[in-house]
Image (spheres, rainbow, N blue to C red):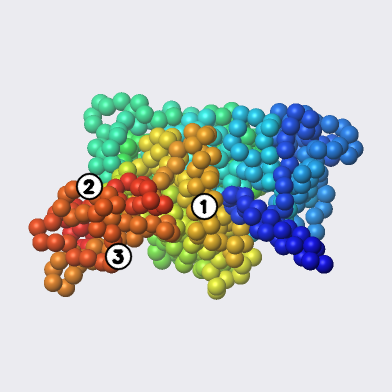
């Protein structure tokens, strides 16, 4: 009896020491076990379905492992389509034992996500050979059906190779919607054969670098040489590439505003019919008309032509029509608009935009698609079958859901990936703030609405301040790790310290893959308050647990021999800056942060 108790204690102790794999997003359930499955030259891949697309998907995700037709191979990786109790179409069941791996899913999408889990369980290597997978049992499925990332390719153009790389990264972390912001004021990026000037003119602007709000306007005679566009063959290739990774591509053609690139090509689209150029900045807003004329039938003929070709290129169910930030001042003085408003009993320009969106929805539906718009489409009355993407906080989504409309939550405070993610003095220039820890706290379902109307959420990378591929990755990751977990994992599984540990493992994976990412989470946070006596009060903090902050106020460079921050302090008389460095596990991490007195004065005003 005594020996049995000892053996049980040894088994419990061994089980407690089994490391939990660093998976992102965290699976619904994970039961670690003892041992591991070793992939050797003798390992075979048994795919128990004749479907050629599924077989290709499996071999593409586990390359280099030979397949076998044996019914019950030993020491094999077995993949099968079969029902799994309590698991939906994107769910899977994964059992890893020293004797083999069995991945089961009711549909191909679930198999794909199970394969991504297996890939994350393996170290990054040129070959899966001579690697091992820890023993465990995972049963998993997503919390939300819409798990998206948006890429703005208008403000800066990202080539086909980068878009594919972006999709690959999305797939590994179980995102399933690629929202492609293809048009805006600064560039029209998709070939429309019936309207060739959209890319001949609208895809090109004058070259500029620098901070978005400082970029100069085009000069007389300056050639529009910066830009690019995707041919229809490019689009088909990328859509197919995404489909193979179980990602739906949602094209966005923004209207009635944010469409100066089309107006530059076809000036008759506006009320004033004035010739304009494709702008390199946003300084024209409210000065030049960048909105379509909603009161001229030729506008709707234009939209019909565009959406006819869009619908043929994108097999997914949705077309996103934007609808955001449309300046309506030029409509107010347009005689055609005045006539239309009177004829349709429209009392405001907001109702006129609703009139426009409702007509556009009929065009979208005539192509067999459903309309999505940003939450501004609520103003003046929502189109009958519209889906609302709520970005100005949660309010628009709540209102749309209460009206019975489907909603995708993407409030900028949590989901905008173009905002500062750390101390601004240590970051490339942008605006606002959305820290990694903030994204991780995002909750897409408000208490007051029907959960079934919340399709999910997504992160959005607007590209005004994102001029190249490497910086795009820097802004997306690791905040997209956080959103992946928010949108896939059960809410109760969220654990910030545990997420940080897993994230750091994935940093090593990205290092091996040469993916750029931000380390801003390691940087100190400086918060400022104006003291009643007129002095500046400094509050320091960190997003990470077990971090120590050391600082200086005498313009010297601090290390761990400098004052340790323990409580808020006042800037000493005569000091003109504070410098802060973070230490973790006895070593410096992140960047030294430096905030000057003039910056402090600006921040507290």
- Does dot 1 land on a helix, a strand or a loop? helix
Name the residue located 32 percent from the left edge and 46 percent from the top edge.
591
Could you tell which of marks 2 and 1 lies nearer the N-terminus?
Answer: 1
Front position in the image: 533 or 266 = 533
Q: Earlier in the sequence, mark 1 or mark 3?
A: 1
How many numbered dots are placed on residues in this image? 3
C-alpha span from label 2 to label 1: 29 Å
Residue 557 marker: 2
Residue drawn 62% across the image and 53% down it: 20
Residue 262 appears in view: no
Report whether residue 66 is seen: yes
Secondary structure category for the residue under label 2: loop
Percent of width and height locating residue 6? 75, 62
Quarter location, residue 529:
bottom left
373, 538: nearer the viewer: 538
The residue shown at (78%, 33%) is 43
Is residue 327 depicted above or below 342 in this figure?
A: above
Q: Which of the two discs, 2 and 3, labels the residue nearer the N terminus?
A: 2
Residue position marked by numbered label 1 in the rendering: 501
Residue 128 coordinates in the image, percent (x, y): 67, 33
**Decide: marks 2, 3 in contact (CB < 8 A)?**
no
Task: Locate residue 151, reporting x and y percent.
Answer: 48, 43
- For label 3, the residue is 566
Rendered view: 562 above or below 152: below
- Where's residue 517, x and y in %? 44, 42
Mark 3: secondary structure: loop
**Disc 2 versus disc 3: distance between alpha carbons?**
19 Å
């Amino acid at each position: 009896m005594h020996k049995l108790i000892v053996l049980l204690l040894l088994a419990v102790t061994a089980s407690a020491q089994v490391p939990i794999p660093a998976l992102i997003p965290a699976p619904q359930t994970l039961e670690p076990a003892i041992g591991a499955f070793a992939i050797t030259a003798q390992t075979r891949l048994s795919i128990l379905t004749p479907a050629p697309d599924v077989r290709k998907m499996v071999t593409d995700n586990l390359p280099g492992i030979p397949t076998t037709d044996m019914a019950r191979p030993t020491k094999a990786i077995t993949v099968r389509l079969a029902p799994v109790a309590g698991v939906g179409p994107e769910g899977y069941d994964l059992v890893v034992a020293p004797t083999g791996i069995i991945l089961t899913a009711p549909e191909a999408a679930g198999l794909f996500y199970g394969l991504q889990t297996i890939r994350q369980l393996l170290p990054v290597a040129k070959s899966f050979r001579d690697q091992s997978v820890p023993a465990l049992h995972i049963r998993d499925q997503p919390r939300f059906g819409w798990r998206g990332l948006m890429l703005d390719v208008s403000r800066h153009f990202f080539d086909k190779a980068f878009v594919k790389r972006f999709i690959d990264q999305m797939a590994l972390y179980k995102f399933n919607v690629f929202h492609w912001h293809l048009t805006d004021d600064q560039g029209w990026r998709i070939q429309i054969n019936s309207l060739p000037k959209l890319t001949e003119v609208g895809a090109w602007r004058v070259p500029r670098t620098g901070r978005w709000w400082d970029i100069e306007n085009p000069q007389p005679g300056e050639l529009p040489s910066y830009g690019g566009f995707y041919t229809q063959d490019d689009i088909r290739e990328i859509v197919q590439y995404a489909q193979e990774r179980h990602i739906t591509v949602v094209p966005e053609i923004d209207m009635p505003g944010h469409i100066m690139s089309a107006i530059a090509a076809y000036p008759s689209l506006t009320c004033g019919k004035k010739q304009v150029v494709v702008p390199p900045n946003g300084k024209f807003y409210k000065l030049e008309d960048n909105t379509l004329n909603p009161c001229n039938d030729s506008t709707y003929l234009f939209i019909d032509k565009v959406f006819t070709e869009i619908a043929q290129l994108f097999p997914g169910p949705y077309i996103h029509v934007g609808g955001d930030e449309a300046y309506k001042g030029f409509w107010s003085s347009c005689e055609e608009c005045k006539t239309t408003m009177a004829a349709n009993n429209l009392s405001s320009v907001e109702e006129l935009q609703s009139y426009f969106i409702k007509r556009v929805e009929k065009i979208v539906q005539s192509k067999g698609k459903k309309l999505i718009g940003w939450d501004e489409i609520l103003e003046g009355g929502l189109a009958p079958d519209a889906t609302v993407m709520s970005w100005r906080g949660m309010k628009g989504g709540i209102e749309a859901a209460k009206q019975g409309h489907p909603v995708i939550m993407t409030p900028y405070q949590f989901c905008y990936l173009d905002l500062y993610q750390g101390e601004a003095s240590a970051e490339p220039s942008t605006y606002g703030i959305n820290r990694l820890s903030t994204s991780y706290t995002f909750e897409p379902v408000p208490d007051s609405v029907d959960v079934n109307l919340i399709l999910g959420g997504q992160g959005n990378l607007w590209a005004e301040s994102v001029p190249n591929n490497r910086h795009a990755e820097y802004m997306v990751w690791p905040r997209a790790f956080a959103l992946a977990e928010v949108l896939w994992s059960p809410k109760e599984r969220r654990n910030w310290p545990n997420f940080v540990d897993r994230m750091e493992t994935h940093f090593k994976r990205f290092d091996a893959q040469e993916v750029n990412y931000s380390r801003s989470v390691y940087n100190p946070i400086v918060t400022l308050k104006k003291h009643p006596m007129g002095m500046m009060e400094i509050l320091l903090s960190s997003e990470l647990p077990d971090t120590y902050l050391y600082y200086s106020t005498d313009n010297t460079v601090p290390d761990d021999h400098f004052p340790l921050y323990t409580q808020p302090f006042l800037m000493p008389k005569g000091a003109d800056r504070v410098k802060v460095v973070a230490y973790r596990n006895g070593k410096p991490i992140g960047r030294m942060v430096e905030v000057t007195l003039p910056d402090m004065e600006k921040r507290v005003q």
